[in-house]
Amino acid sequence: MLTFIKLGGSLITDKRIESSFRQDVTARVAHEIAAALRDKPALRVLIGHGSGSFGHFAAKRYRTIEGVHTPEEWRGFAEVATTAAELNYLVAKTLHTAGVPVWRLQPSASALACDGRIAHLSAEPVQQALERGLVPLVYGDVALDTVRGGTIISTETIFFYLAHHIRVNQILLLGEVAGVYDQNGIVIPEITPDNIADIENALGGSSGTDVTGGMETKVRDMLALTQRKRGLTIRIMDGTQPDLLRRTLLDETQSGTLIHTN
């Protein structure tokens, strides 16, 4: 049973304040993951996290996602990579302290994009880590791009690519919201190809600074992934609720919005 877990940038940082790490929230989530791994030995986990108020502020200043060509833009490219890696270190250290056997894998070290889409990313180290009981940790990062020069690759984009090379059973996306809301502020229990057109108006952007798109982008990308990978389920859920992640990993509860293909 392999689960991809995304710790949203809005959850582990304050996206309104540059370089603001929510260590207490991250530590709580880390302990929940560690507890689930102890209680369910067959569970395998890959963790990814957004760049939140670290990478996104620099990326917005230099418009990195749109392309990298000038010397100033390449310096910005390097700055985005550095700040994203800073947050990744903090997350990894917090997971390690909680007892999670985490292994940091820098996406930009092997990623090559083509007009904003990942064309190559080394999946073999991820597979090998999982087989040895380690927890790979990836994150939103920069990447060289054959069309744009350079760009940003989001955690969801990385998950999308890895899911085509590694068999994954479920993806859990943790943020500050309970799920996807309808126009009345009620959580939509499930999203499928059959009802996506009916809820388009309910999908909007994320709060704070985010250069990789908000809720609409996430939902559309993940629904497309479930259509390509039959049997995969994706859940958007509230990472601020204590113990919810642990119970979800142990199949003790279901919460948030489930994205799947009938």
Image (spheres, rainbow, N blue to C red):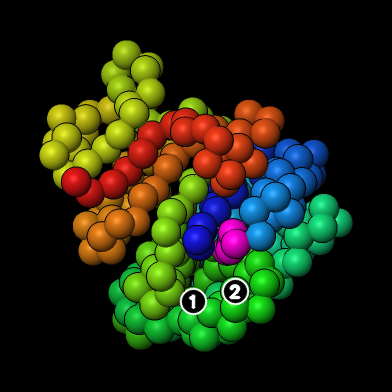
Dot 1: element: strand
Specify which label sits upstream in the sequence, 2 or 1: 2
The quadrant in which residue 17 appears is: top right
User: Residue 173, image x and y in percent?
Assistant: 49, 46
Which residue shows up at 45% across the image and 53% down it? 171
Q: Residues within 10 Å of mark 1 (few under 14, many from 20)?
A: many
Please state the extent of the stretch shown in magenta in the rendering. 42-46
Q: Which residue is mark 1?
A: 143
* Residue 74 against residue 181 in the figure, above or below: below
Q: Residues within 10 Å of mark 2 (few under 14, many from 20)?
A: some
The quadrant in which residue 78 appears is: bottom right
Which residue shows up at 43% across the image and 74% down it? 166
CA gap, disc 2 to disc 1? 24 Å
Q: Describe residue 159's horizontal placement relative to residue 91 as left or right.
A: left
User: Residue 218, image x and y in percent?
Assistant: 37, 48
Q: Which residue is mark 2?
A: 130
- Residue type of the residue flagged with mark 2: Leu
Magenta part, dominant SS: strand
Dot 2: element: helix
- Residue type of the residue flagged with mark 1: Ala
- In the displayed image of the protein, which residue is found farthest to the top? 184
